[in-house]
């Protein structure tokens, strides 16, 4: 059943202006939810980075750093997620949740691609130089 703001105002006894305010908020909430949950398709790029101190305990390592996994849709959106580790299970969860299988994926010199290759079986993988 579809109701316009005018129909809703008449049914509730409120003014149309009073009805438009919450309906506008609801519409904006739906758009934000969709943008956050929409799957990425087409040509995308995936990568991971570590953020934190340059050196920990006098050594250069990922220890104590925050790992961020990112998915970039060419001419479109960027999705990033802080992940606890860069193991196969974690990366597959993020990719499955955000990428449509027929996408073209650019991976650059990313080492982690080997851990998710089985997931990307139906996907075209392009290695950049």
Image (cartoon, helix red, strand yellow):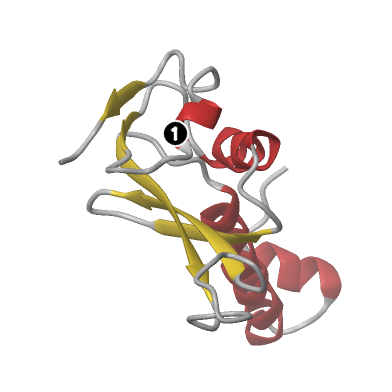
Above or below — where is 4 with respect to 101?
below
Q: Residue at x 62, y 59 (%)?
A: 33
Instruction: State how many labels appear.
Output: 1
How far from the left and from the top, in percent, is residue 19?
70, 78
63 on left or right of 126: right
* Residue that lies at the very extreme toward the front in this rendered image: 58
Corner quadrant of residue 9? bottom right
* Residue that lies at the very extreme toward the right in this rendered image: 12
How far from the left and from the top, in percent, is residue 124?
31, 21
How far from the left and from the top, in percent, is residue 46?
40, 46
The residue identified by callout 1 is 113
Q: Which residue is drawn at 58% across and 63% down?
A: 67
Q: Which residue is drawn at 84% across and 72% down?
A: 12
Q: Residue at x 67, y 42 (%)?
A: 90
36 on left or right of 64: left
Q: Is mark 1 on a helix, strand or loop?
A: helix
How far from the left and from the top, in percent, is residue 101?
46, 23
Q: In which quarter of the image is the N terminus?
A: top right
> Residue 19 or 58: which is nearer the viewer?
58
Q: Quadrant of the C terminus?
A: top left
């Amino acid at each position: 059943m579809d109701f316009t703001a005018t129909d809703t105002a008449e049914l509730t006894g409120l003014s149309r202006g009073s009805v438009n305010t919450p309906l506008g908020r609801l519409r904006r909430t739906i758009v934000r939810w969709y943008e956050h949950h929409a799957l990425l398709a087409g040509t995308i790029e995936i990568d991971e980075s570590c953020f934190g101190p340059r050196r920990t305990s006098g050594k250069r390592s990922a220890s104590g750093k925050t790992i961020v996994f990112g998915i970039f849709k060419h001419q479109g959106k960027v999705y990033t997620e802080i992940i606890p580790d860069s193991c196969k299970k974690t990366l597959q969860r993020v990719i499955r949740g955000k990428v449509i299988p027929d996408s073209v994926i650019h991976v650059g010199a990313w080492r982690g691609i080997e851990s998710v290759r089985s997931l990307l079986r139906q996907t075209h993988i392009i290695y950049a130089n």
